[in-house]
Image (spheres, helix red, strand yellow):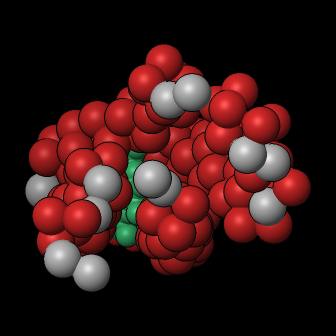
Amino acid sequence: MLLSEIPGTVIFAAATYLIMVAAFYLSKARRLHMIVMAVIIVIDAAFPIYLVLTHDWWKRLIIDGEILSFMLWMHLILVLTLYMFYGLQISAARRMLRGEGTGRDDHRRQAMGILIVRALVIITGALFAK
Ligand code: HEM
């Protein structure tokens, strides 16, 4: 597949993934880390709204029958898992900033889960994208 054939949304999501990985390794640069992660979480929260507004979902899901696609449901479950992880990660960050040790432990443990789930969200989304 040529790069020009990949939908812009997929290229954008993959680019934000690379930025997230950089912010993951730069956690000691606390301000940068917090700002980059917060911006990516807001982007991820807004992404479904953008997709609803810019695609003809009635045609794709109902007329073309994509609602029966296993990939679509996998993708949705992964997205919900990612949102759940984000909630837990923000709550752990707040505890860490208050000086509670469990906050740091939880935040570190959840970090890899977020990287894995977000990669899977982007891959299943890319397979489904048109
Ligand atoms: C809005 C969201 C987030 C906030 C507010 C936040 C905040 C923080 C803060 C305050 C620290 C401590 C930095 C220091 O040691 O001075 C930290 C560390 C860290 N964060 Fe985040 N973070 C967020 C999202 C994420 C995400 C999404 C990931 C993973 C993909 C992540 C991975 C890490 C890791 C691996 C550390 C190092 C933990 C350690 O030193 O044991 N963070 N974060």
For the point 86% across and 55% down, which residue is it? 68
Outermost residue, bottom side: 1
For the point 15% across and 64% down, which residue is it? 4
- Residue 59 position in % (x across, y down): 67, 32
Q: Up-down: is 19 above or below 88?
A: below
Left or right of residue 44, residue 87 in this image: right
Outermost residue, top side: 53
In which quadrant of the rendered image does the N terminus lie?
A: bottom left
Q: Nearer the viewer, residue 5 or 11?
A: 5
For the point 51% across and 41% down, which residue is it? 90
- Residue 38 position in % (x across, y down): 34, 37
Left or right of residue 56, residue 53 in this image: left
For the point 14% across and 46% down, which residue is it? 32
Q: So how many labels did they put on this image?
A: 0
- Residue 62 position in % (x across, y down): 81, 36
**Residue 3 visible:** yes
Q: Answer with the quarter of the image where residue 83 lies.
A: top right
**Residue 98 visible:** no
Q: Up-down: is 98 above or below 113?
A: above
Q: Nearer the viewer, residue 22 or 78?
A: 78
